[in-house]
Image: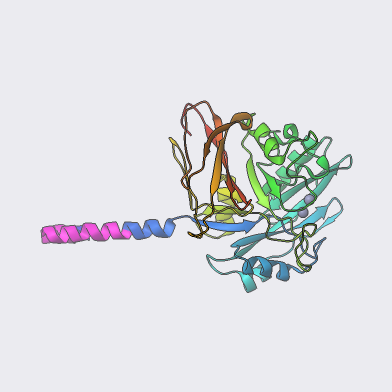
Amino acid sequence: MKKQAAAAGKRILCAFCTSVAFFLASVALASAQPRWYRGNTHTHTINTDGDSAPDAVVRWYKEHGYHFVVLTDHTYRDRGVLTPVEGLNAVFALPGQFLVLSGVEVTDNFEGQPVHMNGIGVREVVLPRGGASIAEVLARNAAAIRKAGGVAQVNHPNYLWALTAEQLAGGDSAQHFELWNGHPGVHNLGGGGRPSTEEIWDAVLSTGRVLYGMATDDSHHFKPECAPQVVCPGRAWIVVRASELTREALLTALERGDFYASTGAELKSYAVDASGIRIELPEGDRRNPTRYRTYFIGKDGAVLKQDDSLTPAYTFTGGELYVRARIEASNGAVAWTQPVFVKDGKK
Ligand SMILES: [Zn+2]
Ligand SMILES: [Zn+2]
């Protein structure tokens, strides 16, 4: 087109060509523009200890504003199945709108302590591998999940008070862990001298190890009405920024930490560059607006800045090691962004 315009030798045509080229580039950019996809990476069905068939579970998530759900039934040392998702996707999947991913909860233990790890998007069943220590159990199961094509996520570290920051900081363990699990029996907030999962997170990050925080339902009960002790869906999720709604794009985004975790708080936008972090938050109902307090948190859990605006921002100073944001909404919901590791003022 440029060649034709040059041949015509008319300025107006060249200008037109430039506009067209710019327009086409914009269209190309727009179609490649990543989008945010909401999903839950921890769900059980009747194939293990859930109360509902896979299709009922999937339908619940599709009808409640999720873009994807990962079915993660338990596998044990002596048995386990991978709940097939092809038939479910044939019925429920819609391009760009909804997708079911296969998964497992590798249900291992060490000397009676639970060591549970989800394999998100695995292509085949993964049975627990065991090991001579909790660190070895974590490492062996994470390796088996990766070998099966999945992303490994350590589950509910405070369930039976089983896992510590030292164990999670081991270099061979999973790179994702449940910062928030919606099951009422997993002690996310710690207490009695035991750290919360968020304190465990900062302890691991402060060693320099990259660990991403997930929020999940661990849903088991879809039949009874939701109540505090019912392990129902809809309590916690992640929102992933991916190029498209496919297994590959979602797993790639998870692996690079391009997502946030939430118990209900939503981000309008999230941007990181070499100078800092910028967030936009939705005001909601103008007459009864949601208000926020955002904490930017660094090494050892130190609060680096508090920002009460709808556009919280943080400028790197260098030497923080990492910076992450915890956004508290006035309705009690929380969102957590992933740690950005900072070196000499640059991300
Ligand atoms: Zn579990
Ligand atoms: Zn579970």
Q: Would residue 172 be seen by someone viewing this image from the given angle?
A: no
| Snapshot colouring | rainbow
Choose between 335 and 91: the one closer to the eye. 335
Q: Would residue 94 be seen by someone viewing this image from the given angle?
A: yes
Is residue 70 depicted above or below 304 in this figure? below
Drawn side of residue 18 relative to residue 98, left or right: left
Classify the position of the N terminus by image quarter.
bottom left
Q: Position of residue 153 (x, y in %)?
A: 69, 47
Residue farthest along the right direction in this orientation? 111
Is residue 52 depicted above or below 138 in this figure? below
Q: Residue at x 67, y 37 (%)?
A: 201
Q: Is residue 180 magenta?
A: no
Q: Residue at x 78, y 52 (%)?
A: 184
Drawn side of residue 45 relative to residue 68, left or right: right
Using the rendered view, name the quadrant where residue 320 is placed: top right
Residue farthest along the bottom direction in this orientation? 91
Q: How many marks?
A: 0
Q: Residue at x 44, y 55 (%)?
A: 33
Q: Position of residue 270 (x, y in %)?
A: 49, 47
Which secondary structure class fits the magenta region best? helix
Is residue 221 depicted above or below 139 in this figure? below
Is residue 259 depicted above or below 347 in this figure? below
Q: Is residue 18 magenta?
A: yes
Q: Residue at x 53, y 50 (%)?
A: 291
Residue farthest along the front direction in this orientation? 287
Choose between 124 and 277: the one closer to the eye. 277
> In the image, which residues are magenta?
4-24
Q: Position of residue 139 (x, y in %)?
A: 74, 39
